Image: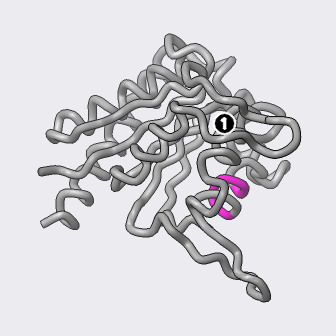
């Protein structure tokens, strides 16, 4: 049985280019016989930024945690807004990865105890900023956050980040090439997962 892959789509409209990237990646995995579970973040019911003490996990977050534990590979697809991930995606991580689910810092230690090791991740990020400018002029703050402050401490590695942009000025041909890259990347991941599962 092939490992399960969890894809988390954080674009508000799954009919846009973010949704097309998710579909292309999914198609690349399914062509290799992989099961892909997709979570469309805007459709999940949870309080992203609760006031005061966080409430009990909502049903959708409990289900999301279960999917994360069953997955061998995570795929995140989201837009870059104001230099980083959407607030709802950050809220999802704060709630779903919190309370020592993904990692825990021990007193007197700078290194966390990671609980989600044995998993890898691909991060597909759309942006209107040219990727080179986002990296060299802005310092890629969103990429650093997801790699070093969220997935890394959780033990998820390797993490591959792919930037697609500038989206607003891209042509239909460019978008087709990006979708082909996403599908091709999924094929590479499928072969790696198959090799490590045998």
Give the farthest residue toward the front.
56
Indicate left or right for 133 with 93 as reference. right
Q: Secondary structure at mark 1?
A: helix
Residue occupying the point 80% across, 40% down: 83
Q: Vertically, is 151 above or below 128?
A: below
- Please state the horizontal and vertical placement of residue 102, each as a whole percent of the image: 57, 61
Give the farthest residue toward the right.
52
Indicate left or right for 143 with 125 as reference. right
Which residues make up the magenta segment? 144-148
Residue occupying the point 47% across, 49% down: 122
- Please state the horizontal and vertical placement of residue 117, each as a whole percent of the image: 45, 69
- Please state the horizontal and vertical placement of residue 161, each as a whole percent of the image: 55, 50
Q: Residues within 10 Å of mark 1 (few under 14, many from 20)?
A: some
Image quadrant occupied by the C terminus: bottom left
Along the line of sight, which residue is nearer the eye, 126 or 33?
33
> Is 131 included in the stretch rendered in magenta?
no
* Among the 4 quarters of the image, the one containing residue 109: bottom right
Looking at the image, how many numbered discs can be counted on the residues?
Answer: 1
Indicate left or right for 181 with 90 as reference. left
Q: How is the image coloured?
A: one colour
* Among the 4 quarters of the image, the one containing residue 38: top left
Residue occupying the point 16% across, 41% down: 32
Q: Which residue is mark 1?
A: 89
Dominant secondary structure, magenta: helix
Residue occupying the point 66% across, 58% down: 99
Give the farthest residue toward the bottom.
108
Q: Vertically, is 168 above or below 118?
A: above
- Please state the horizontal and vertical placement of residue 35, each as a whole percent of the image: 23, 38
Q: Vertically, is 73 above or below 76?
A: below
């Amino acid at each position: 049985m092939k490992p399960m892959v969890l894809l988390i789509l954080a674009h508000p409209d799954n009919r846009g280019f973010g949704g097309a990237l998710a579909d292309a990646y999914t198609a690349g995995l399914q062509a290799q016989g992989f099961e892909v579970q997709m979570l469309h973040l805007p459709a999940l019911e949870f309080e992203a930024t609760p006031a005061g003490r966080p409430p009990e996990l909502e049903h959708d977050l409990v289900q999301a945690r279960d999917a994360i534990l069953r997955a061998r590979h995570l795929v995140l697809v989201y837009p870059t807004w104001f230099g980083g991930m959407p607030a709802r995606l950050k809220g999802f991580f704060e709630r779903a990865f919190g309370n020592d689910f993904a990692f825990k810092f021990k007193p007197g230690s700078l290194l966390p105890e990671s609980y989600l090791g044995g998993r890898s991740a691909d991060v597909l990020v759309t942006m209107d900023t040219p990727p080179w400018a986002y990296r060299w002029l802005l310092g890629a703050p969103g990429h650093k956050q997801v790699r070093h402050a969220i997935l890394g401490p959780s033990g998820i590695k390797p993490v591959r980040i792919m930037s697609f942009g500038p989206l607003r000025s891209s042509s239909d041909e460019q978008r087709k090439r990006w979708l082909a890259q996403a599908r091709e990347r999924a094929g590479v991941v499928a072969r790696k997962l198959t090799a490590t599962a045998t």
